[in-house]
Image (tube, helix red, strand yellow):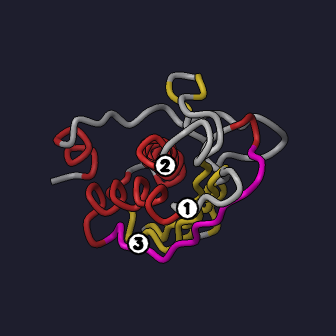
Amino acid sequence: MTVEERLAQAGLVLPSPPPAVASYEPWTRAGEWVFTSGQLPWRDGVMAYAGRLGAELDVDQGYQAARLCALNALAQVKAAAGSLDRVVQLVRVEGYIHCAPGFRGHPQVLNGASDLFNAVLGDAGRHARLAVGIADMPLGAAVQVMVTARVR
């Protein structure tokens, strides 16, 4: 089964890769390595999840935001590699959680991205990761996810 078939089976549609919102590239490729820029929870050009976890948003909303960021990251990887079936390994996932003081649910929020990557990429989706909380986020986004992938 292809990655896109697994996405469809999960009821998910890979979006078009979101464009950059400033002076940077949404992804770069160096040989077999693809690095995405931070992917925000865009849905159809609209910020779907804005606000701080532990204040305006709860952990479940953060999980859904991270999941949406992951879909956008996969769209960038596909743009870089030509096909998600060329992903050998999703090596590292970095997640930045826009949160209120005292919020400690960073791992649970970022599981939204990790669970999606593991489900649709199988063993190639298993990754190391970083989940950190930050006081502010570009455009007020709730979550930002970046990935490093090895592709063939």
Q: Nearer the viewer, mark 3 or mark 2?
A: 2
Q: CA distance from mark 3 to mark 2?
A: 19 Å
Asked if the magenta segment contains residue 134, the reply would be yes
Q: Secondary structure at mark 1?
A: strand
Q: Is 9 displayed left or right of 80 in the figure?
A: left
Viewer can see residue 95: yes
In the picture of the structure, the residue carrying the numbered disc 3 is 89
Q: Secondary structure at mark 3?
A: strand
Q: Is 152 displayed left or right of 13 in the figure?
A: right
The single residue placed furthest to the bottom in the displayed view is 128
Q: Nearer the viewer, mark 1 or mark 2?
A: 2
Q: Using the image, determine if residue 44 lies above or below residue 119.
A: above
Q: Is 87 displayed left or right of 40 in the figure?
A: left
**Image position, residue 132 (x, y; %):** 64, 65
Using the image as rendered, state which of residue 34 and residue 54 is in the foreground. Answer: 54
The amino acid marked with disc number 3 is Gln
Q: Identify the mark nearer the N-term, 1 or 3.
A: 3
**Image position, residue 107 (x, y; %):** 48, 66
Q: CA distance from mark 1 to mark 3?
A: 11 Å
Q: Secondary structure at mark 2?
A: helix
Q: Which residues are magenta?
A: 124-137
